[in-house]
Amino acid sequence: MNAEHKQLESNNGSVHYWISRNHNPNTKCILFTHGVTANHTMFEKQVAYFEKNYTVITWDVPLHGLSRPYQNFSYENTAKELKSIIDKENIKKVILVGMSMGGYPSQEFAYHYPEHVDRMIMIDTTPFGLMYYSKSDLWWLKQVAPLGKMFTDNLLRKSMAKSVSKTDYSYKKMMEMLAPLSKTEIIEQMDIAYGNFALENKNVQFDFPVLLLLGDHDTTGKIKKYNEAWVKATGYPLHIIKHAAHFSNGDNPEQVNLEIERFLYDNYLF
């Protein structure tokens, strides 16, 4: 990877990002946003594939990776940080790719700054929209962190990595991303990420193309049902990633990369 590491200072903390810039003036920019307790390296298989033909940005979401500590976390603030990144890089439009929790900063950015979004790919994530979630669904989201406290440090890490992966690569990558975090930080990230989703969820409507990707073995929560409801409500295409669990872009990067590439290519033909 030929990414340049940069950082932004905001009132809430330092935000770190990596950019592989393609100097062709007509090149599109893909912006990848990782899941909870992960970091920008979650997309190393995608960066290596797409940086040849696109400008690629990855980042450590506030409270994650090198973007710690960070005060006043909210998805609205993550959207503002993303806007600062593209402004700094003089990028007018981005292709948003969000994985799991990474779908929330992506949708929040698209809600506030639709004029800066070319299209969006959502990987193993769930929709913004009040109609999708019952009171019981939102209550369970708030129980993720308390349940995590019941595990020993080692068991928490191993169970998290195992639950999201189907391949050795994804398991090891998840363990690697968890390694710099204390158990307290892991639980804090989950608590804030899911708690804020319950608080900031809203009805949205996007007028650009959206693609949904979902691992065929993704058994995280009710994610499969949420995606089915998302398709029914919006008509977005949902493509199933074979031999993949929740971390599908790690389990089957070949298919995920081809799905993204085909989605971009097909839509640019017309």
Image: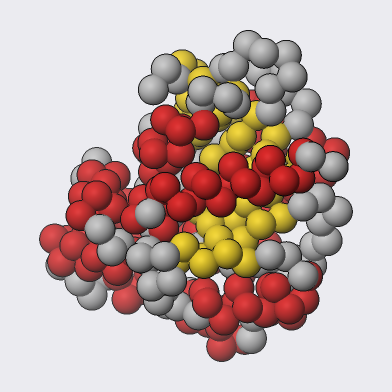
Name the residue rendered at 50%, 45% in the picture. 257
Say which of 48 and 198 sits in front: 48
In the image: residue 202, left or right of residue 175: right
Q: Residue at x 67, y 79 (%)?
A: 229
Q: Is residue 93 visible?
A: yes
* Rendering quarter of residue 199: bottom right
| Residue 58 x/y as whole percent | 50, 33
Where is residue 238 drawn, in percent x and y? 62, 67
Tell me residue 138's x, y (percent).
57, 79
Image quarter where the N terminus lies is top left
User: For residue 244, which quarter of the picture?
Assistant: bottom left
Q: In this picture, is 58 found above or below 151?
A: above
Residue under the image location 32 percent in, 76 percent down: 147
Q: Is residue 129 above or below residue 111?
A: below
Residue 210, horizontal then vertical, whole percent:
72, 55
Report whether residue 109 is seen: no
Between residues 41 and 184, which one lies in front from this camera angle?
A: 41
